[in-house]
Amino acid sequence: MKKITLLVMAVFALCISCDDDDDTAFVQEDFVLGKWYLNQIGSINAQNKVVYVDYVNTTDCEDDNLVFNEDNTFEENDFELINSTCQNLQNTGTFDVQSNKIILSTMVDGVAMEQTYTIVSLTYVDITITYTDTETNKIVFLKFLKQA
């Protein structure tokens, strides 16, 4: 119950505005553009605090990354070592930034899929996003760093 309360409070805090200027977008879309490398993964512990661990790519391949292009397409690059060869298990599609959300749309085996991430923080060089894992029903936090 505490986790639900914490989530509701976080969403409520994001929705409160000090100004009546609701025409201003929460996220500058050009900050989202670029190649992002997963740096840390976080979860909520028993004390309702987010705890992060460093993300380490499990292979000797290129680091996993997420690319947002100017034409609103994205590439999710997941590199794995298969039969002694680095292979990219790439997922592609389109993205849309709406307020503090990034919505990824893709086709998987002919079926349209959509994944929504909430932006917790964003600068030109780092981004923290969150989503709910559908298998565990737990909130996952992801910290990315932009390629220099």
Image (cartoon, rainbow, N blue to C red):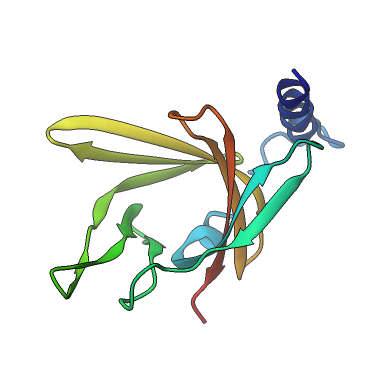
Q: Position of residue 139 (x, y in %)?
A: 59, 36
Q: Nearer the viewer, residue 26 or 86?
A: 86
Is 111 situated above or below 50? above
Image point (35%, 52%), residue name: 72
Quadrant of residue 17 within the rendered picture: top right
Q: Nearer the viewer, residue 63 or 59?
A: 59
Q: Nearer the viewer, residue 107 or 71?
A: 107
Q: Position of residue 104 (x, y in %)?
A: 38, 42
Image point (26%, 40%), residue name: 106
Image point (63%, 59%), residue name: 53
Query: Is 68 positioned to the left or the right of 20 in the image?
Result: left
Q: Nearer the viewer, residue 88 or 146?
A: 88
Query: Is 45 positioned to the left or the right of 63 in the image?
Result: right
Q: Residue furthest top?
A: 1
Quadrant of residue 75 within the rendered picture: bottom left
Q: Position of residue 115 (x, y in %)?
A: 40, 36
